[in-house]
Image (spheres, rainbow, N blue to C red):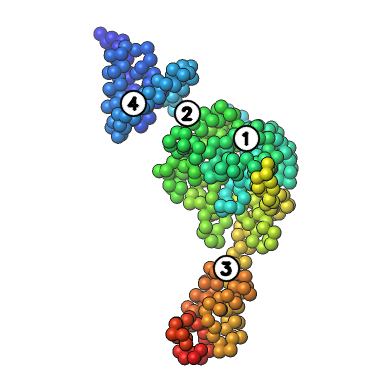
Amino acid sequence: MTTDREAFLASFKEYLATTPAVELLNDYTYLLIYINHDPYDEQERYQYLVDAVSTVGTKFSQVDTWRAGCAKRQREDDNAFWESAMAWHDHHYAKAPEPYCLSDVPCEETEWLVPDVLPRGEISLLGADGGTGKGIWQAQLIAYVTAGQTSGFFPEPPAQTGRVLILAGEDDPGKVLKGRIAAAGADMSKVMVVSADDYYLRTGHQLCIGDDDITTFVAKINPILLILDPLQSFLPPDVEMASRNQMRGAVLPLKSLSTKYHLATLISMHTNKRPGVSGRGRLADSSDLWDIARSVLMMGRCKNSTEGQIYLSHEKSSYSKPAQTVLMHIEDVTVDGVPTARAIFDGSTDKKDADFMEERRLRLAQTKDDTTAAILNALAESRLGSMASSELRAAVTKEVGCSEKTYNRAYAELVKSGRITKKAIRERDGCNRWYSFSDWSKSDDQLKK
C-alpha cells in the first residue's frame, strides 16, 4: 500500500519532471519543499530539486540563494508569499485555453487615454532620433494625464486623470526629468519613476521587460500610463532587435500587463540612420514592433524650417483615423533655478513623416547640387582655373553653407567624373600642397614658382 509520504514524493517528482528546469526556482516549489513538512522529507525533496536544476547549469550556490530569499520573504509577509506561490500554481496547472464562439463575444468600444491617439490596454510607440525632443513632448503628455491640462497638443479634456509610471533608461530623474515635467505643468505627486541606473545599483542586475518587479510596480502604483524610455534600455541582453520572433516574445509581457491593468503603455525608441526611409522603415532594427503596436507616433525635425521646428506624425492607428501632425518648437525655461526646456505648440498639418523625410532628401540633394556648382564656379573664376584645395573648401562651404560631409561627396563625384583633378604641387618652401584643377585648366608642377 502506498503511504501518503510516498504519494506526495511521487507527485513532487512528477512536478519536477513536467516543469521546465529553468522555471523550478519559484515560490510554489519552495512551498512544496519547506512548508509544514518533516525535516528529513524536506532534505530529500531539496536534493531532487538540486539534481533537476543542475541539468541546465544552475549552481548549488544559486539554489541556496533562492532558498534563503524565499525564506526571508515568507517570514516578512506570509500571506503575500502564499499568494505568490499559489499564483504560480494556478499558472502551472491551468488548462490550455479553448476556442470559443465569436457570437458570444460582446462588442467593445476602444477606451482612450488620449482620444484617438493612445488606447488603454494596448502598446503604442514613439520613435525619433536621439535629441529630437521625445522626452519634452512626453512631459506635455504627462501633464495631460496627471493634471488634465489641455493645450494645443491635447485640446480635449481627458476622461480620467491618474498616475504615470516612468521607466527611465537614460534621463536622470533629478537633473532632467523633474524640471522638464514640472515645466509642463504636471501634478508631480502622480508621477512615479524607476531609474535603470538606480535599479541596477540597488539590485545588481538590469531591469528588463518581463521581470516580476515591473508587474509589482504596476500593481502597487496602479498607473493609467506606463512609459519606457527608451525601449533599448529594458531589453534582456540576449535579445536581438533585428530578430522579429525575439522582439515579439520580449514585448509580449508588456502587452499582457497593459491588458491586465488596463493601462496605456508608451514605448519610446530610437530610430535608425538609414537614408530615404520613413514610417516603419525608420524604427530601429525591428519592424515587428510596428505590427505589435496599435498606435505609432514618429518625430523629426522640419528641415525647411529656420525656427528649429519639430513635427509629431501619427503614422499608425488601428482603432481610429490617424490624428493630424503636430508642429512644435522647444523653449528654454527655468524651474527652481535649474535650466530646462518645454515644448510649445505651433500648429498642425496634414503632412506625414514620409513628406518631411522627402523634403529632407530633396534639400540634401539640392545642397549637394549647389555645392557641386559652387566648386566648379570657384575654379572657373580663379586666374588659372585652379585653387589650393584647402582654400577651395573654405570658399565653397562659406558660400553655400554646406556641411563638410556634403562638400566631400560633391568633390569626390567631380574627381571621379574627371571634371576636376587634384595634384600635389611642390612650392618654394619645399613642401607639397594639394591643388584642385578644372578639366580645362593647364598647369605644371612649377606653379607658384
Classify 259 as above or below 397. above
Please tell me which residue is depicted at 45% across the width and 33% down the height of the picture. Answer: 203
| Precedes in sequence: disc 3 or disc 1 | 1
- Characterize the local packing of mark 1: few (<14), some (14-19) or many (20 or more) Cα atoms within 10 angstroms: many
- The answer to which of 429 and 400 lies nearer the viewer is 429
- Characterize the local packing of mark 4: few (<14), some (14-19) or many (20 or more) Cα atoms within 10 angstroms: few
Q: CA distance from mark 4 to mark 3?
A: 60 Å
Labels 4 & 3 near each other (Cβ < 8 A): no
Q: CA distance from mark 3 to mark 1?
A: 42 Å
| Residue 445, percent from left and from top | 45, 89
Q: CA distance from mark 1 to mark 4?
A: 38 Å
The residue to which callout 2 is attached is 98
| Precedes in sequence: disc 1 or disc 4 | 4
Residue 261 image-quadrant placement:
top right
Please tell me which residue is depicted at 54% across the width and 36% down the height of the picture. Answer: 194
Labels 3 & 1 near each other (Cβ < 8 A): no
Labels 1 & 2 near each other (Cβ < 8 A): no
Residue 190 appears in the rendering: yes
Please tell me the numbered disc located at residue 403.
3
Please tell me the numbered disc located at residue 332.
none
| Precedes in sequence: disc 4 or disc 3 | 4
The residue to which callout 1 is attached is 191
Classify 43 as above or below 363. above
Residue 248 appears in the rendering: no
Q: Which amino acid does the dot numbered 2 rest on? A: Glu
Q: Which amino acid does the dot numbered 1 rest on? A: Val
Disc 1 vs disc 2: which is toward the camera? 1
Q: Which amino acid does the dot numbered 3 rest on? A: Ser
- Characterize the local packing of mark 2: few (<14), some (14-19) or many (20 or more) Cα atoms within 10 angstroms: few
The residue to which callout 4 is attached is 64
Mark 4 falls on what kind of element?
helix
